[in-house]
Amino acid sequence: VAESVVHTLLDLLSTTSADGSTSLQVAIFVRAIMEHYPDLRSSLLPKLLSSISDVTSNPVMCICLWIVGEYSETLESISEGFDSLLEEVGEPSFAVIKKDKDDAGDGAADAGEPRIVTKNVVLADGTYATQTIYNTQSKPAKGQMDNTPSLRKMIVGGDVFLGETLASSLTKLCLKAKKDPAANAVEWKSRTAKSLLVMCGIVKMAEVTIQAQRSATSDCVDRLTLCCRALLDPKQQSLIEPILLQQGKVQFAKYLANLKAKQQAQQESKQNQSHQQQQQQKQDDQPSTQADDLIHFRHLRAFAVEGGDVDLDDGADLARATGYNDAGSMLSNELSHIYPLSGFADPVYAEALVTVHDYDIVLEILVMNRTASTLSNLTVELSTMGDMKIVERPQSHTIGPMDQMTIRASIKVSSTETGHIFGTIVYTDMSTNEKHYINLNDIHMDIMDYIRPATCTDELFRSMWAEFEWENKVAISTSIPNLVDFLNHIVESTNMRCLTPHADQKDGSFLAANLYARSVFGEDALVNVSVEKKDDGKLAGYIRIRSKTQGIALSLGDRITAVQRGITSAK
């Protein structure tokens, strides 16, 4: 079954999607199958070699080249793989000279430029007229215009890392062929020379091509120099050969084992969470009080009661009847969302209870008249800053002396970003008929009300990291001395989830981790933490935030900055 499935999936290596994830996932799956099922390698390698010419994604091409170099074991597969790769890459050089590009561009422009012909003609009535004709040469079809193989296009385009992978695969194939006693020594010496020429062409491309990654040029020179020494120097070959031919598969097998263990741990964690949720559901389903339990109402009792029947704990009876047993925790949660809008010395005292329901914010504003006069036309005029819109504005009211009332307002939220609600109380004093204004304190809406921890794969995280354009970079300034403690503090303070597995040991001098969260509006928030411990024991580094929108990147950066500054007092 696995063989038939993989053969079908190999046809999808050339699939072109919006993000290129389809062909990349297929290549990753085929690489894992090659490691887990050695019996399928002989049948899958020819199919893979025939599909390389249709691959259009650079990461997929890198994986295919690595598979050919690692799992070509027989002399026939080694020869076939080597010849296929050389045919795809072509002859060096791979560097495009600017003069050649200009000449090619001028030729194309001349070929496509229209030619104008003007002549005089005699019309049917005997009069003369001028006729202008535009002659354009048809351009060749796209397939006829460029028959360059995909691998050569990518290397000529400046992909240095792909060139390194190709050089490493060719080196592995040459070393494997030299170990086989049935190999033709003269033929493989010629192939070794061709490999060296390809490596020299790749290095030249990395040095002169503008599109090449300049930061990878030095690494390319070092790695290809190592490959050349492995092919030319017998002493260096004896040292490098075990690393190139054995350690690659060993490390990949360890990676697959760790990945499987991580998946099993996640599955067990989900099962444990499901079991806990079922147990909690069973506990919640149990009645907190029976339907036939007596509820004592003290005011309805007769005056003549026995001393043993007196029960003044009406609050407990009411809690039993309503099931409101968590009143203490709910009250503390409500108190944490109450914001004073005016001072006690103001004629009108106001405070707001803010309740966030994902897309809606409900304000319950308590207004207290602290004067001995009646206040008419009292209105709370609210305004918002950020991506918020007031749906229901407060109405005008009249409040008597020393009286109070609750005014409600509704605000609609459409995106995840830090917002501010500010406003003014306007009223008329009935005793003096004067109009007064009271400026209210701002209500700061925290981004943590909209952020929820989420999870995603490493490939999807890297894809979103490359796609998102808004980035906020925050320098680390903290008094926490331990790397793991600092990471846990950031995760808890930002309500995110750490995607990078790490040990709980507090030793080490460097830590890098990826954090991920999703807002209630479906927006993704990506965070990369890179921190190191200096010689003086202090932590230094940067926290980079990326998102598709500017608001969530700036708001999350402000949150992290505020959390860092409050670490000393919190600890």
Image: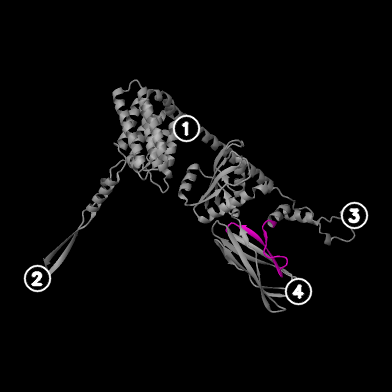
Circle 2 crowding by C-alpha within 10 Å: few under 14, some 14–19, many from 20: few
Secondary structure type for disc 2: loop
Tell me how far mark 3 sits from mark 2, CA to CA.
134 Å
Q: Earlier in the sequence, mark 4 or mark 2?
A: 2
Residue to which mark 4 is pinned: 372
Q: Residue at x 23, y 50 (%)?
A: 107
For discs 1 and 4, the disc positioned in front in the rendered view:
4
Instruction: Give the Cα separation between the discs numbered 1 and 3.
Output: 81 Å
Inspect the image, locate mark 4, and give the three-letter code of the amino acid beneath it: Ala
Q: Quadrant of residue 87?
A: top left
Q: Which residue is mark 1?
A: 252
Tell me if 426 is positioned left or right of 227 in this view. Answer: right
Query: Which type of secondary structure does the marked residue at label 4 adopt?
Result: loop
Residue drawn at x 35%, y 37% is: 203
Q: Position of residue 345 (x, y in %)?
A: 73, 67
| Magenta residues, start to end | 335-359
Q: CA distance from mark 1 to mark 4?
A: 81 Å
Mark carried by residue 353: none
Kindly identify which residue carries mark 2.
Answer: 126
Closest to the observer, 550 or 209: 209
Give the alpha-carbon distance from disc 4 to disc 2, as whole Å.
107 Å
Say which residue appears at 34% left-offset and 38% top-offset. 204
Q: Relative to the observer, which residue lies in front, 117 or 149?
A: 117
Disc 3: which residue: 307
Secondary structure beneath dot 1 equals: helix
Residue 428 as seen in the image, left or right of residue 358: right
Is disc 3 in contact with disc 2, using a CB cutoff of under 8 Å? no
Which mark is first along the chain, 4 or 1? Answer: 1
Nearer the viewer's eye, disc 4 or disc 2?
A: 4
> Where residue 376 sits in the image (x, y, percent)?
68, 75
Q: Is residue 358 magenta?
A: yes
